Image (spheres, helix red, strand yellow):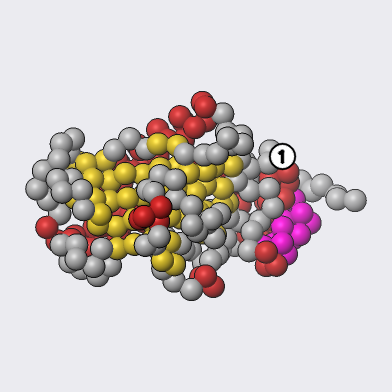
Amino acid sequence: MIQFRRPAQVLALAALLGAGCATTQQTKVMDENYCPFMGSALCAQLVTAEDPSRFGSGGKVAYLRYVNPNAKWTSYKSIMLQPVTFWAGDDDKLSTKDQHQLTNYFYQTLEKQLGTKFQMVSEPGPGVMRVQVALEDATTATPVLRSISMVIPQARALATLKFLVTGSYPFVGSAQAEAKITDSESGQVLAAAVDRRIGGGALGTAAQWQLGDAENAINAWAGQMTERLSSWTSGTAAP
């Protein structure tokens, strides 16, 4: 039987167990041959970017990606960001309201992050990249059980053991997304990616709302896209 301690003791012990844990972590996409947003032709060109053993350690590169070897990255200085859309099967359990909330959050986060490095424009033109993103799937964390598994020391220890065995913490939420970057005038595909992320073991995520893990995934993707595109277009790094 679990013995509950005083809140301060619980947090201190849980902090020791959760030291160094990530807010969100990369995991394998649900189906590597299924990309409903970008289509089968482009999906077939996606390759696994790195060895899967990196999962759980940050996942700084999309799980699947394509980069056009002929893209002239340094010629691009502006971005035309399209509205983020939601794609899911008939059995999807996310409400329409939550779908809208997440896609709006995704768009606003991308616009804010990308705007720190690029001029954001609304019309096609020379040197303008068109960025299209779709949230393909999102699941909620399990209320109460997620919090217990993160905060109560004994439950936290069991959750950590599950992570060591399966690579995932219990009761977490998830999100999967597709992204396509094209030349705004010619339509030439410059890059594409599919990635999936799940909730990590950071103590600070214990009390977040049910779709907090999906929002954390969105934050990670926006930062990752901004960093990659900025380094490629400035010429400081190669794709």
> In this view, which residue lies farthest toward the right?
1
Residue closest to the eye, 209 or 129: 129
Asked which quadrant contains residue 66, the reply is: bottom left
At a point 29% along the width and 38% down the height, the residue shown is: 82
Instruction: In the rendered view, tell whether residue 69 sits above or below residue 177.
Output: below
> In this view, which residue lies farthest toward the front?
41
At a point 36% along the width and 44% down the height, the residue shown is: 133
Whole-percent x, y for residue 79 in the image: 21, 45
> In this view, which residue lies farthest toward the top?
97
Q: Which amino acid, by three-letter code, is at mark 1?
A: Val
Q: Is mark 1 on a helix, strand or loop?
A: loop
Q: Is the magenta stretch mostly helix, strand or loop?
A: helix
Instruction: Note whether residue 219 is visible.
Output: no
Q: Horizontal placement of 133 versus 95: left or right?
A: left
Asked whether 157 falls inside the magenta stretch, the response is yes
At a point 48% along the width and 73% down the height, the residue shown is: 51
Residue closest to the eye, 228 or 82: 82
How many residues crowd mark 1 within 10 Å: few (<14), some (14–19), many (20+)? few
Q: Horizontal placement of 236 versus 10: left or right?
A: left
State the residue position of label 1: 144
Whole-percent x, y for residue 114 in the image: 27, 47
Instruction: Note whether residue 39 is visible.
Output: yes
Instruction: In the rendered view, tell whether residue 101 sits above or below residue 180.
Output: above
Whole-percent x, y for residue 70 in the image: 19, 66
At a point 76% along the width and 46% down the height, the residue shown is: 6
Whole-percent x, y for residue 204 in the image: 57, 48
Segment colored magenta: 152-163
